[in-house]
């Protein structure tokens, strides 16, 4: 049975409604500038696409600053020079089954050196070797 991934971004919370889309954020279809599904609100790569890229295409994760006090996003870099972004808040999207969530979490741990988990309070937590860590 295939893993289940989020059908729409739900991590942003609140009524992020635009004139174009009354239902809030959605996964934007691939296009010329973004050849993968991306969040219509923040531009983050879809979690299933991130997993596929890390597994199969030699993509590397690079950190960003910790300006919000935690590792809020990673840049996905390819040997070709292409770069995409992933916001870790999308780990809180609804729709993961346990297998998909654990798989993505392990890929992030292997490729970024940071372990993410959801606390008992439903908040996204992480373990890093030290504050500001960049692998």
Image: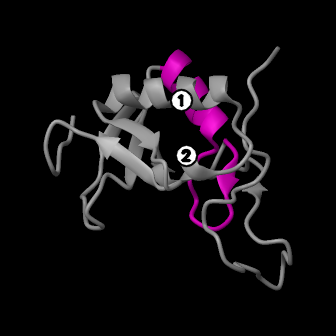
Q: Residues within 10 Å of mark 1 (few under 14, many from 20)?
A: many
Whether residue 124 sits left or right of residue 9 in the image: it is: left
Q: Please give the count of numbered marks on the rendered protein.
A: 2
Q: Is residue 83 above or below residue 56?
A: below
* Mark nearer the N terminus (1 vs 2): 2
Relative horizontal placement of residue 129, taking residue 108 as reference (left or right): left
Image spot of residue 97 (x, y percent): 71, 31
Q: Is residue 82 visible?
A: no
User: Residue at the spot x=25%, y=66% of the render?
Assistant: 67
Q: Which residue is mark 2?
A: 91
Q: Residue furthest bottom?
A: 19
Closer to us: 120 or 81: 120
Could you tell me if the residues under marks 1 and 2 are in contact, i.e. CB atoms within 8 Å? yes
Magenta span contains residue 88: no
Closest to the observer: 63 or 72? 72
Secondary structure at numbered mark 1: helix
Quadrant for residue 39, please give it. Answer: bottom right
Viewport quadrant of the N terminus: top right
Q: Which residue is mark 1?
A: 104
Q: Position of residue 8 (x, y in %)?
A: 76, 53
Residue span colored magenta? 36-57
Q: Secondary structure at mark 2?
A: helix
User: Residue 47: x percent and y percent?
Assistant: 61, 39
Q: Residue at x 64, y 44 (%)?
A: 46
Query: Measuring 56% from the left and 34% from the top, which residue is drawn there?
Result: 50
Q: CA distance from mark 1 to mark 2?
A: 9 Å
Looking at the image, residue 16 lies above or below residue 89 = below
> What residue is rendered at 76% in x and 31% in y?
4
């Amino acid at each position: 049975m295939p893993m289940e991934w989020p059908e729409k971004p739900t991590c942003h919370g609140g009524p992020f409604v635009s004139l174009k889309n009354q239902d809030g954020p959605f996964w934007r279809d691939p296009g010329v500038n973004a050849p993968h599904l991306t969040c219509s609100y923040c531009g983050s790569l879809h979690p299933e696409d991130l997993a596929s890229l890390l597994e199969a295409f030699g993509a590397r994760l690079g950190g960003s600053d910790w300006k919000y006090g935690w590792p809020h996003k990673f840049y996905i870099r390819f040997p070709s020079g292409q770069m995409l972004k992933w916001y870790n808040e999308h780990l809180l999207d609804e729709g993961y089954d346990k297998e998909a969530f654990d798989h993505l979490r392990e890929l992030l741990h292997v490729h970024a050196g940071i372990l993410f988990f959801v606390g008992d309070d439903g908040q996204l937590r992480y373990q890093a070797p030290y504050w500001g860590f960049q692998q």
